[in-house]
Image (cartoon, rainbow, N blue to C red):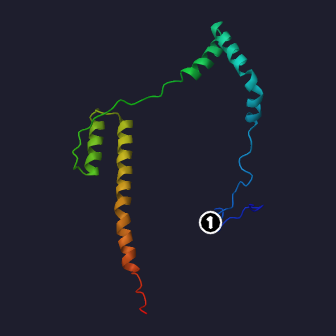
Amino acid sequence: MTDPKPTRKNNGTFSKGSSGNPKGRPKAETVALRKQLAPQAEAIIRQVIDQALAGDLVAAKLILDRILPPLKPVAAPVSIPLEGGESLVAQAQAILSAASSGQISSDIAAQLIQSTANLTRIIESQELKPRLEALEAALNPPKPRPKH
């Protein structure tokens, strides 16, 4: 059983096993409404379709928005020649050069630069892990076991 009053640590987070919301998410009123509407759902849908067919533009828009939602913008693929061995800095410069020459839009360039920055952080993390482990091993060498 959980504590009646959740406890927090000094840093403000909740202690392990102690929830800030012990009763869970409250039931939404829409659940009850959905249960009430479920038996009449087919008749309601038929009514909206009939109204749309009779020329009601609001009903038609409601149906079309559900069947054919608005298209989301999709950027066209871009190709920027990059050498495989180029540094990430050189790749970022190529992206900026392509944007400044009008080859790609500035928003696509910003996304590509952000992706390059994220890749840099991933590479840094990957390279730092073994180095940190080696430093920790050097600072905390294993203690020799006593001989019997």
Residue 101 image position (x, y, % from top left)? 26, 34
Residue 112 image position (x, y, % from top left)? 35, 42
Category of crowding for the residue at label 1, using alpha-carbon neighbours closer than 10 angstroms: few (below 14), some (14–19), many (at least 20)? few
Give the residue at the far front of this rendering.
Answer: 148
Taking the image as shown, residue 4 lies to the left or right of residue 77, namely right
Residue appearing at x 77%, y 34% in the figure: 32
Residue tagged by mark 1?
11
Query: Picture quarter containing residue 21?
Result: bottom right
Residue appearing at x 70%, y 13% in the figure: 47
Residue 74 image position (x, y, % from top left)? 42, 29
Quadrant of the image containing the C terminus: bottom left
Query: Picture quarter containing residue 55?
Result: top right
Quadrant of the image containing the N terminus: bottom right
Residue 18 image position (x, y, % from top left)? 69, 61
SS under mark 1: loop
Residue appearing at x 28%, y 35% in the figure: 79
Give the residue at the far top of this rendering.
Answer: 54
Asked whether 43 or 75 is in front, the reply is 43
34 over 81 or under it: above or below:
above
Taking the image as shown, residue 36 lies to the left or right of residue 74, namely right
Which amino acid type is marked by label 1? Asn
127 over 116 or under it: above or below:
below
Query: Picture quarter containing residue 69?
Result: top right
Asked whether 19 or 147 is in front, the reply is 147
Question: So how many labels did they put on this image?
Answer: 1
Asked whether 33 or 8 is in front, the reply is 33
Residue appearing at x 71%, y 64% in the figure: 7
76 over 53 or under it: above or below:
below
